[in-house]
Amino acid sequence: MKNAASIVGVLLLSACASATPPPSGPTILVLPGTGKSFDLFRSDDQACRGFALSEVSGKAEQLSSDFYAAATLMQQRYDRAFAQCMYARGHKVPVTGPYSDRSQPAQSAARTPPPPPPPGQPPAEAPPDYRPQ
């Protein structure tokens, strides 16, 4: 009986050791949003860590049997969920690629040419290099 209990204990420990542990926290830098207090930032940080953890918990079994690959994928999922949560709460998160605060004007497929110059001679006060030869 003692031998059977030892075997069950060893099996339980080995099952726990083979599972990919959840991430311990985000690996991305998030800064407080404009006009947000540090206390609010800390509160949002804790709430978003919980949200991110809930997004990745239970998904380790669906991942690769390779421990490193599974841990890396879980960390990426955790970081994405954390960033989405913090961004939704108004904080500054990292972005990839070029970024601009200004909206880009819509570019039309066919550009219209500029209008022709007005008819007649340029005014007398025009610079000499502007006058036709």
Image (tube, rainbow, N blue to C red):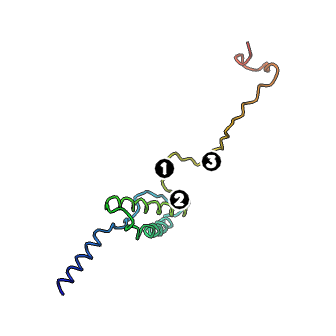
Mark number displayed over residue 66: none
Per the image, label 1 sits on a secondary structure element best described as loop
Callout 1 touching callout 2 (CB < 8 Å) = no
Per the image, label 3 sits on a secondary structure element best described as loop
First along the sequence among labels 3 and 1: 1
Under mark 3, the amino acid is: Ser
Horizontal side of 103 relative to 84 (left or right) equals right
Marks 3 and 2, Cα distance to the nearest angstrom? 20 Å
Residue closest to the eye, 70 or 130? 70
> According to the image, label 3 marks what residue?
103
Under mark 2, the amino acid is: Gly
- Considering every residue shown, the one lying at the far top of the view is 133
> According to the image, label 1 marks what residue?
96
User: Within 10 Å of the Cα at label 3, are there few (<14), some (14-19), or many (20+) other Cα atoms?
Assistant: few
First along the sequence among labels 1 and 2: 2
> According to the image, label 2 marks what residue?
33
Q: Position of residue 52 (x, y in %)?
A: 45, 66
Q: Position of residue 68 (x, y in %)?
A: 32, 59
Q: Position of residue 102 (x, y in %)?
A: 61, 47
